Image (cartoon, rainbow, N blue to C red):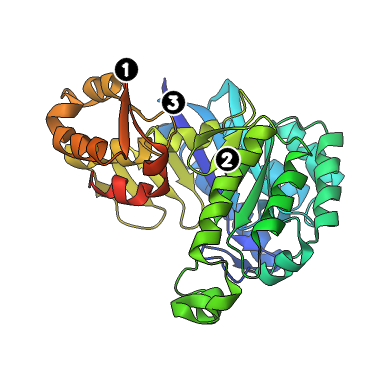
Amino acid sequence: MKPLELYIHIPFCIRKCGYCDFLSAPSGKEERAAYVKSLCRKIRSYAEFAGDYCVTTIFVGGGTPSILEAEQMQRIFTAVKETFKLGESAEITIEMNPGTVTIEKLNIYKAVGVNRLSIGLQSADDRELAVLGRIHTYDEFLCSYHMARKAGFQNINIDLMSAIPYQTRESYEKTLRTVAALEPEHISSYSLIIEEGTPFYEKYGGGRNAACLPDEDTERLMYEDTKRILQEYGYHRYEISNYAKEGFECRHNLGYWERTEYLGIGMGAASLINNRRFTEGGEAEELSVKDQMAEYMFLGLRKIKGVSKQRFAESFGRNMKEVYGTVIEDMKKKGLLAEHGDSVLLTERGIDISNYVMSRFL
């Protein structure tokens, strides 16, 4: 059976954060109940399709999935298990936000097979959390984190953010050290991107209130601090923005970067099946071989270990150097790419300007 990743989207939150451009919005109990009913029906509609696949990872994202009642999450997983074959060692993740979880919910997560939690903290500084519009304080995060440990979860990710308005290098370092001292198995740290169409863009975009944001040099130092400090606590960087204790790399995300087939279920969820990309309710895009090779390169280069020349040849029947030799040699001369045996990978300098390097393969 072919490996398959499942992504299940829960588009609800208590309050939409000012920087968020994901498909999510506040909701009432009636809307959530109707959505879960529709979602379960949609999951079951894949019964015939599911026969060819074994699910290796599930990621329930949002929005805030932990806003759902325990019984609603139980119903979703009942539908999944009645429809799909799950691998014995499947990684099953739920995103949760502090202030939206209870011990009852956590116990249900455990009971339905969830073995990984991803907690949206963003900062250990309450002022920075307020600026972001988060609904929780750091103490409330701590309560949720310890509750998850008490419930028996032994694989927890914590999301952090740098370049927050009013954030300093010192306050970011304090957040890194405070969180790393808790010893979660995985830490994701992303730089804030101010997207058009968000309240943050209206407030800070286009140079408005720029003095509130860390300058470019400070942002760069924060980026360097992330790797240095997390290494001190035993985390290794395996992807541009992701750090893990040994053996706790997020398999679901690695699947995206390695182009494992994935099925997205729920409002706006994206899928990649048989080299066709589509979103629920949207049109499908058939990927040409050229598109597939480009994706292999620019997605795979997100991984610190880079891309495999042998796997490229096995996947496409062509030598990587035959297709991208000119680009690879140019990037090597500029000190942005390196070759180590079978691997082509970003250098430290290449990681710094990875978007530029990856764009060369489009």
Label 1 residue SS:
loop
Front residue of this view, candidates 92 and 301: 301
| Residue 52 relative to residue 312: left or right | right
Can you identify the residue that label 1 sits on? 341
Label 2 residue SS:
helix
Label 3 and label 2: CA atoms lie apart by 32 Å
Label 1 and label 3: CA atoms lie apart by 27 Å
First in sequence: mark 1 vs mark 2:
2
First in sequence: mark 1 vs mark 3:
3
Q: Residue at x 86, y 49 (%)?
A: 143
How far across and how far down the image is residue 335, in percent?
A: 30, 38
Label 3 residue SS:
strand
Can you identify the residue that label 3 sits on? 3
- Give above or below for 102 relative to 108: below
For the question of whether residue 292 can be seen, the reply is no
Q: Residue at x 68, y 71 (%)?
A: 131
Residue 227 — which label? 2
How far across and how far down the image is residue 152, in percent?
A: 81, 31
